[in-house]
Image (cartoon, helix red, strand yellow):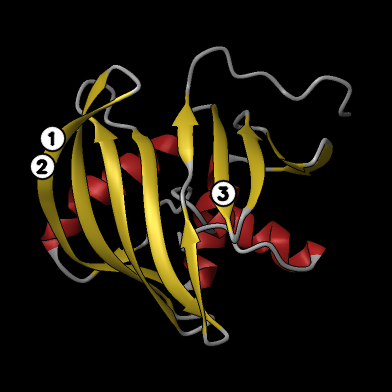
Amino acid sequence: MSHYRILSFSTLAAAVLAAGFVAAPARADDASCKPVLDAITKATRTPYHEFATTGGKSFEKIYTTTALYVGSNGHWVKMPASPQDLIDALRESGAMFTECKSLRTEMVAGQAATVYAARERLTSVGEDDHSQFWIGNASGLPLKSESDSQHGGQPSHVSPRFTYDNVQPPAGVQ
């Protein structure tokens, strides 16, 4: 899940699938992470539109349950992606969640959400992130997340938000 590293195309494909909240059944070392993992798993079966910023750059992801579209500055890349593809990518990343705890309830885009803190680790790249996830109380889906980590000695902050209504592929992208 470790939040949207924008790298080379082949790394981007793997990172996008395993990053952000689209980190389906990862390993949790403690039961406290079950609500976060349940929400992320549910998101792999739900079309969504994601808007994210990292390092002062913005990008979008549109997931239809059959394809993942990644866009930045009006340029889009399409990759086949099923719920199982997302789950497999996460497992390959070695994502693991620990030390999860419920912090508070907040409103996100008019929806009540429980905020969870979590420590997540991608063993494939040896990185730890400190993240927060806003999980919709009614939907059980992630509404936004915040993640802080170190990449090559540089601090990184990623902040995606998610919508689930009327999700369509980007116009003109085949």
Q: Residue 110 appears at what percent x and percent y?
A: 29, 17
Amino acid under disc 3: Thr
Name the residue rendered at 79%, 41% in the picture.
Answer: 73
Q: Residue 121 appears at what percent x and percent y?
A: 38, 74
Amino acid under disc 1: Thr
Picture disc at residue 105:
1
Q: Is residue 4 left or right of residue 116?
A: right
State which tag comes first along the sequence, 2 or 3.
3
Q: Are marks 1 and 2 in contact (CB under 8 Å)?
A: yes
Work out which residue is located at the far top of the displayed protein and give it: 166
State which tag comes first along the sequence, 3 or 1.
3
Secondary structure state at the residue bearing disc 1: strand
Figure quadrant of residue 83: top right
Q: Circle 3: is it few (<14), some (14-19), or many (20+) Cα within 10 Å?
A: some
Q: Which residue is mark 3?
A: 53
Q: Which residue is mark 2?
A: 104
